[in-house]
Image (cartoon, rainbow, N blue to C red):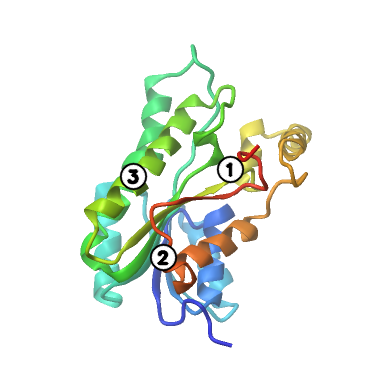
Amino acid sequence: MSRKLEGKIAIVTGATSGIGLAAAKRFAAEGAQVYLTGRRQAELDAAVTAITSAGGKATGVRADSSSLADLDRLYAQVQAEAGRIDVLYANAGGGGMVPLGDITEEQYSDTFDRNVKGVLFTVQKALPLLSEGASVILAGSTAAVMGTPAFSVYAASKAAVRSFARNWILDLKGRGIRVNTLSPGPVRTPGLVDLAGPDAAQQQGLVDYLASQVPLGRVADPDEIATVAVFLASSDSSFVNGVELFADGGMAQV
């Protein structure tokens, strides 16, 4: 059976855990040569080993997506080794829960640097390397279209990401490059459970609460989101452009 990403060069930022790691594994299993980024070397090395030990092709590049110098270094290496990019999943990001009244400039800047600045320059600096027909996937969130207590800064940053996709497809018209936003609902990742703090009971309480808000009655596994990312990365979605694709179990649809 032909693999969906055979021979493709793919980049997944923020790929040391959670959705990013699951997507990198899936891309490699589908035949892509994958470049993974992350801010912590030990976790990055472990992610690369997990992929290569399963027979995939993976290269780790330590990089912070909000650092333009790190992005320049990443793309210089990709250009030297691969010469092009066929799939770019701008997945790196994150944020915490802070209610209005307690929001600080530091928290605002950290969230927007990771989720907005990082995504913007991850894509812009990749433009010279993006092949005709390349697929760009932006990491959105159901938070951008739903009200959530103490989550306004994160939600606003993800709304900006959604707006990027709508506008960039017009900027890139004529190059055949597709830009889509993949917006998960609650997914059992370290980033999600850490919102509840270090206590295991509180973490499970958060997961159980979120599951109760999802029509399917559960939170997602990261691999379920990675499967959707493969669809957007591959020719299966060749006429899908500028959309926000929700993988949320129906949470934001009712």
Q: What is the number of the mark on residue 12?
A: none
Task: Please name the residue that numbered disc 1 is placed on.
Answer: 191
Question: Marks 2 and 3: CB-CB under 8 Å?
Answer: no
Q: Name the residue nearer the viewer: 245 or 98.
A: 245
Q: Amino acid at mark 3?
A: Phe
Residue depicted at x 27% and y 63%:
75
Residue depicted at x 51% and y 70%:
27
Residue depicted at x 34% and y 46%:
166
- Of the residues under marks 2 and 1, which one precedes in the sequence? 1
- Tell how many labels: 3
Q: CA distance from mark 2 to mark 3?
A: 18 Å
Label 1: element kind: helix
Q: What is the number of the mark on residue 239?
A: 2
Q: Quadrant of residue 114?
A: top left
Q: Amino acid at mark 1?
A: Gly
- Residue 159 x %, y %: 43, 36
Residue at the top extreme, as displayed: 101
Please give left or right for residue 239 compared with residue 197 in the image: left
Task: Please name the residue that numbered disc 3 is placed on.
Answer: 164
Q: In this view of the protein, can residue 243 be seen by the observer?
A: yes
Residue depicted at x 44% and y 70%:
34
- Of the residues under marks 1 and 3, which one precedes in the sequence? 3
Label 2: element kind: loop
Label 3: element kind: helix
Q: Amino acid at mark 2?
A: Phe
Q: CA distance from mark 2 to mark 1?
A: 32 Å
Residue at the bottom extreme, as displayed: 1
